[in-house]
Image (cartoon, grey):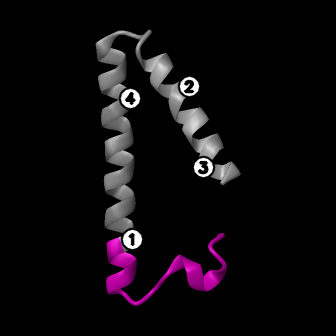
Amino acid sequence: MLFLVGALLVLGVVLGAVTHVPVAVSAVGGIAIGLWLALFAVRERLAGRLGRSDRSHGGLR
């Protein structure tokens, strides 16, 4: 429960900061996060198809 409260607090701070920066900066940040998530999804999908998982090694490299 404490983790959820902390996550919501951080989300509120980030959203508050976004309202004070220009739209172009927010858009670039959003695109960067979207690309990062897309690359992560592709990496996870490829790892699943190859039968490998980072979790089998403890999650750390």
Residue at image mark 4: 29
Q: CA distance from mark 2 to mark 1?
A: 30 Å
> In this rendering, is residue 7 above or below 22?
below
Q: Which residues are magenta?
A: 45-61
Q: Look at discs 2 and 1 and give the one toward the viewer.
A: 2
Residue sitting at 37 percent across and 52 percent down?
37
Q: Residue at x 43, y 19 (%)?
A: 18
Q: Residue visible at 38% across and 67% down? A: 43
The residue labelled by disc 2 is 13
Question: Dot 4, how many residues are within 10 Å of its Cα: few (below 14), some (14-19), or many (20+)?
Answer: few
**Nearest the eye: 11 or 47:** 11
| Amino acid at circle 4 | Gly
Q: Earlier in the sequence, mark 2 or mark 1?
A: 2
Q: Nearer the viewer, residue 52 or 4?
A: 4
Q: Which residue is mark 1?
A: 44
Q: Amino acid at mark 2?
A: Val
Q: Seen in the image, is 9 located left or right of residue 44?
A: right
* Callout in the foreground (2, 3): 3
The residues bearing labels 4 and 3 have C-alpha atoms spaced at a distance of 24 Å
41 over 53 or under it: above or below? above
Amino acid type shown at disc 1 = Glu
Q: Earlier in the sequence, mark 2 or mark 3?
A: 3
Q: Is residue 26 above or below residue 6?
A: above
